[in-house]
Structure formats: C-alpha cells, structure tokens
Image: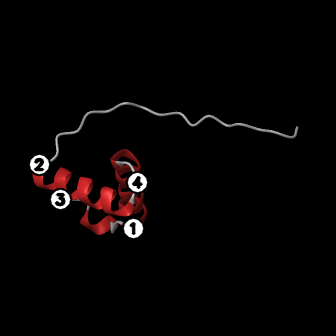
Amino acid sequence: MGFDLKKEVFVNKTFRLPKELVEKCQQTASAKGVFLNYFVQKAMSYALENMDDDNMSE
C-alpha cells in the first residue's frame, strides 16, 4: 500500500463578481504568493465555516 495518490474532484463554475472584489482578491493572492483560484477556494471555505446562520437572509 506504500504510495497512495488521491485525486481531488473539481467543478467548473462561473460567478459574476464586482470588479473591485476581484481586483482585491487578485492583489491579496499575489501578495501572499498564491494563485487566485487557491485564494478564492480558501476564502470561500473560511466564509462558510465561520458564517453566522442568523444572517443568511442577505
């Protein structure tokens, strides 16, 4: 069983985002030395894990 490679499954989606938000994400990802896609994945995961369920009406 030594060497095990697990392939992560990805899905392509298109989102419409405000230009300013995308630019800020690009700048932050660049400053952190990561790809924009990786940054967005982490930001979305963090938001979902830390959201307050009482504020879901927005």
Marks 1 and 3 in Cβ contact (< 8 Å): no
Spatial distance from mark 3 to mark 2, Cα to Cα? 20 Å
Name the residue: 40% across, 62% down. Answer: 46
| Residue 13 against residue 35 in the figure, above or below | above
Question: What residue sits right under mark 3 in the picture?
Answer: 58
Spatial distance from mark 4 to mark 2, Cα to Cα? 20 Å
Marks 2 and 1 in Cβ contact (< 8 Å): no
| Element under disc 1 | helix
Marks 3 and 4 in Cβ contact (< 8 Å): no
Question: What residue sits right under mark 4 in the picture?
Answer: 34
Between 21 and 36, the residue placed more toward the observer is 36
Question: What residue sits right under mark 1 in the picture?
Answer: 50
Q: Compare marks 4 and 1 and give the one earlier in the sequence.
A: 4
Query: Residue 32's x, y, as percent?
Result: 37, 62
Name the image quarter holding residue 51.
bottom left
Q: Type of residue at label 3?
A: Glu
How busy is the neighbourhood of tag 4: few (under 14 within 10 Å), some, or many (20 plus)?
few
- Frontmost of labels 1 and 3 is 1
Question: What residue sits right under mark 2 in the picture?
Answer: 19
| Residue 54 against residue 3 in the figure, above or below | below
Between 36 and 41, the residue placed more toward the observer is 36
Q: Compare marks 3 and 2 and give the one earlier in the sequence.
A: 2
Q: Type of residue at label 1?
A: Asn
Q: Residue furthest right?
A: 1
Spatial distance from mark 4 to mark 1, Cα to Cα? 22 Å
Spatial distance from mark 1 to mark 3, Cα to Cα? 16 Å
